Image: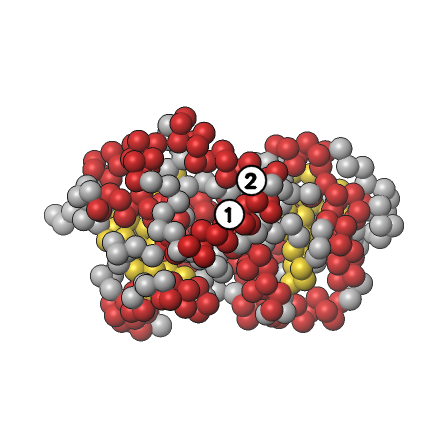
Amino acid sequence: MEEARRILVLTLSFGSGHVRAAQAVARGLRRQEPRADVRVCDALEGARLPFRAFYVWPYWAMVRYAPSLWGRFFSARVARGDAATAPPWAFRRGCARVFKLVEDFRPETIVACEVAACELAALARREGLTRARLVNVITDHEAEPVWVKPEADAYAVADEGVRAQLCAWGAPPERVEVCGIPTDEDFRARHDATETRRRHAVRDDAPLVLLMGGGMGPTRMDRVAASLCRSGVPLHVVAVAGRDARALRKLSRVKAEPPARLSVLGWADDVAALMQAASVLVTKPGGLTTTEAALSSLPAVFFDAIRGPEQRNAARVAEAGAAVIADGPEAAAAAALSLLRDAEARRRMSECARRLSTPDSAAVIARLALHANVRALTAAARLTA
């Protein structure tokens, strides 16, 4: 009996987006290759304390408390053409569990859904721990030179702009495929908006404003919620804080003034349904969130973008006509209220979002991972067309 194919999907949980992308790719792989042994690994789970202290925590501190410093740091890293975010020994010692998994599992393909995951996989190849094919999946509309590795066999990118970036930094053009950003199949299913509104106690006549803050960085959701809730406009804000306990605490202190209403959630499993039921989304522009909103044809207002890829994500969607970029939380609330008053503007933005969406990206990336090269990917795509 033929041995089942072994595929490792590797990520790091800097925010929930990278993990959601990895899970979407894994599901796409299992659908196309049901017998395959597909494993998702978050390299930060089990990482050693010194690695977290010197690699993870400074990053979190910068994006949360000194975002301008992080912006300068990221820009300098790109300008210098840095080939690594940390020295090899730091990854080898700090993420020893990952290298042990690679040796024991013996994957034939590693799919890297975060830049440090790409470094880990390339290092494992370089040190002879694996001969697995390496597929890099970039989940933002901007990349950085660290992604470009001689060990990478294929790159799945969000758009032509990212493809041009990677090629300019030395990636062979024939290895770079524009696939879009992978999202969960739940965003392609249709959800009953009436049932979603009932589940969240939204009045029949009130527009639903979905407020999200992303999984990392400074998020001033409470100020957006407060501005919306004292606007005097009949609306219902559903604020999803995710795993950000600090944001959840701040939101819980916001008092809604009638006719506005506010529901505060931590982690929500029905974000796809909420996006389809909402009139407007107000959010930080993470790569996964912007893609999910496009799939939901949902007009968006972006605020508090982290310097670097999030800013480019926001610009990309705004340039397509599907979003508005606001300068701060109060401006974000004002932009959302303006859209609620303008049904025609929302209709136009919804249509622009629909044109921007890439519903089959996870399936395309799965084909790229399962086949030996881009020519095979193209042939497979023709067969399934």
- 143, 226: nearer the viewer: 143
Local packing at callout 2 (Cα closer than 10 Å; few below 14, some 14-19, many 20+) is: some
Report the residue at 65% width, 55% height from top.
302
The residue identified by callout 1 is: 73
Three-letter code for the amino acid on which mark 1 is drawn: Phe
- Residue 267 in the image: state x and y as whole percent: 58, 38
Quadrant in the picture for residue 320: bottom right
Report the residue at 67% width, 48% height from top.
211
Q: Which mark is residue 62?
A: 2
- For marks 2 and 1, give the CA distance: 9 Å
Residue 37 left/right relative to 72? left
Residue 169 left/right relative to 122? right
Asked if disc 2 and disc 1 are in contact, CB closer than 8 Å, the reply is: yes
- Residue 209 in the image: state x and y as whole percent: 71, 52
- 306, 71: nearer the viewer: 71
- Residue 91 in the image: state x and y as whole percent: 33, 37
Report the residue at 24% width, 64% height from top.
373
Tag 2 secondary structure:
helix
Three-letter code for the amino acid on which mark 2 is drawn: Met
Q: Tell me if I can see residue 297 in this picture.
A: no
